[in-house]
Image (tube, rainbow, N blue to C red):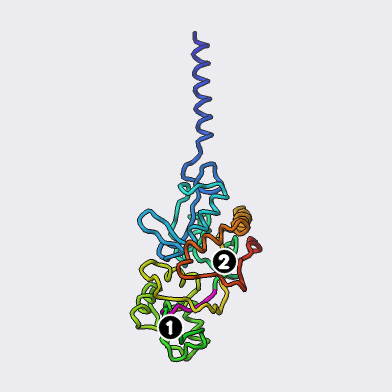
Amino acid sequence: MRKTTYRIAAAVAAAALALTACGGDSGSSAGGDSKKIKIGTKFDQPGLGLKEGDNMTGFDVDVAKAVAKKLGYEENQIEWVESPSPQRETMLDAGTVDLIFATYSITDKRKEKVQFGGPYLVAGQDLLVRADDTEITGPDALTGKVLCSVSGSTPAEKIAKEYPGVQLQEYDTYSLCVEALAAGQVQALTTDDAILAGYAAQEKWAGQFKLVGKPFSEELYGVGVKKGSDLCEKVNTALTELFDDGSMDKIVADNLGPANYTPNPATNPAKPGGHCG
């Protein structure tokens, strides 16, 4: 009788140990046994990364969902994390996020701290004007015009340096610039063309604005990945598949199509790879 009791106790202990080993940590991120991945993006950028309640929308968001699916994660297994621009490298290094999709331009300086999957879009600085504007056809036509951008931003600095005849009006956010453009307080707005298209594609601004369509810089949007992570090449494989099967074209059209945005054909489609080192 005593031997039987010992056998039962041993069997129960073994079963409990097996369950513990299989269970894993439900809070772990990509690469662990659980099925969760933490993705950083913007929460306040219409058309690209916007959070309204529990709903995430935008171009970056949809690219992230598509890549995550190819990595083995369903939409409900994504944990979205707001990733402000100044904090992105720190968040990746600390493991706060596994991947970042947030109009994240690939630069040599940033590659010293993180690696990049992609690019998945080559954007460029452009101009947004009112739909009935026929005078502003490019940056060379800005002399004497009032142009809006965000204080301290690279686009604002580029305009101030290269086009001194422009009257530069700076606000804290692009949303304020869009409001000023709609009210006629400024005559154009400048930043990356994809960001401009995201604002113009909002239902509240339908038909009011147009992109000039003459980008005068190149911004390679990449997927931020922690240094040393094996996710980088997997992301490149996923992105390449999205280009090959036409999914990327659909994602662009769904999110930025209302603004008649087409990625610059001189630099797109982007070619993922080469930035995982």
Secondary structure, mark 1, is: loop
The residue positioned 52% from the left and 29% from the top of the image is 17
Q: Indicate the amino acid at tag 1.
A: Asp
In the displayed structure, would residue 203 be above or below residue 155?
Answer: above
Residue 109 located left or right of residue 170 = right
Magenta span covers which residues?
A: 124-130
Q: Which residue is mark 1?
A: 133
For the residues labelled 1 and 2, the Cα–Cα distance comes to 28 Å
In the displayed structure, would residue 81 be above or below residue 166?
Answer: above
**Majority secondary structure in the magenta region:** strand
Q: In the drawing, what numbered circle is on residue 88?
A: none
Secondary structure, mark 2, is: strand
The residue positioned 57% from the left and 50% from the top of the image is 70
Q: Position of residue 129 (x, y in %)?
A: 43, 79
- Badge 2: how crowded within 10 Å, few (<14), some, or many (20+)? many
- Badge 1: how crowded within 10 Å, few (<14), some, or many (20+)? some
Q: Position of residue 118 (x, y in %)?
A: 60, 62
Can residue 232 be seen by looking at this rendering? Answer: no
Q: Nearer the viewer, mark 1 or mark 2?
A: 1
Asked whether the beta carbons under mark 1 and mark 2 sit within 8 Å of each other, the answer is no
On-image quarter of the C terminus: bottom right
Q: Earlier in the sequence, mark 1 or mark 2?
A: 2
Who is closer to the viewer here, 131 or 60?
A: 131
Q: Position of residue 186 (x, y in %)?
A: 38, 83
Instruction: In the displayed orientation, state which residue is furthest to the left.
Output: 183
Can residue 234 be seen by looking at this rendering? Answer: yes
Question: Is 248 included in the stretch rendered in magenta?
Answer: no
Who is closer to the viewer here, 43 or 121?
A: 121
Q: Which residue is mark 2?
A: 121
Q: Quadrant of residue 121?
A: bottom right
Q: Indicate the amino acid at tag 2.
A: Leu
Instruction: In the displayed orientation, state which residue is furthest to the top.
Output: 1
